[in-house]
Image (cartoon, rainbow, N blue to C red):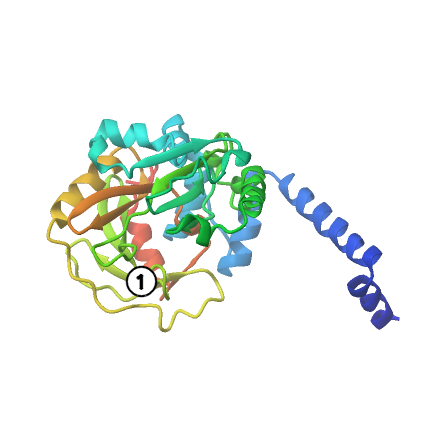
């Protein structure tokens, strides 16, 4: 009997429809759970131990506390990939902004006529972390403009805050931005320097290397000494995740200065910077790396970084 039911659900139109209804209903019911209860359930599921919000010790646990207790209008502005630009310009200067080529809230405006002809560019949305579509040759990389419009119509409807209750994303106006694609002199996407800032001070630099290849991740302390821990989604192979060592950029002190200036308004923030042949750009600001659910291993580093972050009630 069980075998027949499984075959019915997998191999018939009605069966697949029933599965979709069940999954959709379960998903919608999950979103009705209050934030704190939801985070406790998901944290235990992802980390394997209970979430203590009264006395959080690990960085991942403290990020859950921040979700519930540290949300301001500035967080909302800076989580928006378009609105953050005015904050960056005010704090450090417009010369650190990635050139904006196009902005729209209508995916049907993504046409061959409206998209850049000569520049290499990236298309992404303002309200989530879905990455983006890289375009170096418009007609070759986007052979089906209707498919592109359909993809972004779906992305604009997504509710990014739901999966991790990162409520800074909740009220962002979903829009589409087209930015110049940053490339080094060899035509490669540059390393992404992610400065993890604790109480306004950069302390850990997570460098994303070979971003169009295997996307290795190297981690350094603020003095550019390698530190050997991994920070990955549960279930991912972390054994070979580190790439070849990266030399400290010549203008590293300037990068630190920019990260510190932008971070000065927040308890914890990840400031992403690019360094394109010596030219610094601000990528984005992220307030809960991995939504506080990724594995930091050895786990001692989760506790070490937890100590780096002092919450308001801690001395």
Q: Say which residue appears at 80% left-offset and 67% top-offset.
A: 6
Q: Quadrant of residue 32?
A: top right
- Return the x and y of residue 109 as percentages of the image width and height: 51, 33
- Return the x and y of residue 300 as percentages of the image width and height: 34, 62
Q: Quadrant of residue 225?
A: bottom left
Check the picture and name the quadrant holding the N terminus. Answer: bottom right
Q: Is residue 43 left or right of residue 102?
A: right
Q: Say which residue appears at 33% left-offset and 44% top-offset.
A: 118
**Residue 55 seen in this snapshot:** no
Give SS at disc 1.
loop
- Return the x and y of residue 161 as percentages of the image width and height: 52, 40
Give the residue pinned by disc 1.
210
Check the picture and name the quadrant holding the C terminus. Answer: top left
**Residue 211 seen in this snapshot:** yes
Q: Residue furthest right?
A: 1
> Would you call the spot at circle 1 few (<14 residues within 10 Å), some (14-19), or many (20 or more)?
some
In front of the other: 313 or 195:
195
In front of the other: 64 or 272:
272
In front of the other: 55 or 234:
234
Q: Is residue 290 above or below residue 115?
A: below
Q: Is residue 249 left or right of residue 46?
A: left
Q: Is residue 13 left or right of residue 61?
A: right
Q: Say which residue appears at 28% left-offset and 68% top-offset.
A: 243
- Return the x and y of residue 205 as percentages of the image width and height: 25, 54
Q: Is residue 14 above or below residue 244?
A: above
Q: Is residue 187 left or right of residue 139?
A: left
């Amino acid at each position: 009997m069980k075998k027949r039911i499984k075959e019915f659900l997998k191999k018939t139109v009605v069966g697949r429809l029933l599965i979709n209804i069940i999954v959709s209903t379960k998903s919608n019911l999950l979103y009705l759970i209050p934030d704190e209860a939801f985070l406790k359930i998901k944290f235990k599921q992802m980390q394997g131990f209970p979430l203590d919000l009264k006395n959080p010790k690990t960085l991942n646990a403290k990020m859950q506390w921040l979700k519930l207790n540290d949300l301001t209008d500035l967080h909302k502005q800076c989580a928006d990939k378009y609105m953050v630009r005015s904050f960056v310009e005010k704090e450090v200067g417009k010369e650190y902004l990635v050139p904006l080529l196009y902005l729209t809230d209508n995916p049907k405006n993504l046409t061959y006529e409206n998209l850049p002809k000569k520049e290499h560019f990236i298309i992404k949305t303002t309200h989530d972390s879905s990455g983006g579509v890289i375009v170096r040759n418009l007609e070759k990389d986007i052979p089906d403009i209707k498919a592109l419009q359909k993809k972004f119509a779906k992305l604009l409807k997504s509710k990014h805050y739901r999966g991790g209750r990162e409520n800074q994303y909740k009220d962002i106006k979903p829009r589409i931005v087209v930015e110049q694609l940053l490339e080094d002199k060899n035509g490669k996407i540059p390393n992404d320097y992610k400065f993890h800032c604790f109480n306004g001070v950069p302390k850990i630099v997570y460098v994303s290397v070979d971003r169009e290849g295997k996307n290795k991740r190297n981690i350094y302390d603020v003095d550019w000494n390698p530190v050997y821990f991994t920070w990955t989604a549960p279930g991912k192979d972390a054994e070979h995740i580190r790439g070849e060592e990266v030399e400290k950029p010549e203008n590293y002190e300037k990068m630190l200065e920019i990260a510190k200036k932008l971070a000065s308004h927040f308890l914890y923030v990840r400031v992403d910077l690019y360094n394109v042949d010596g030219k610094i750009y601000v990528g984005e600001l992220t307030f809960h790396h991995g939504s506080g659910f990724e594995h930091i291993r050895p786990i001692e580093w989760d506790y070490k970084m937890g100590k780096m972050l002092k919450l308001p009630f801690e001395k």
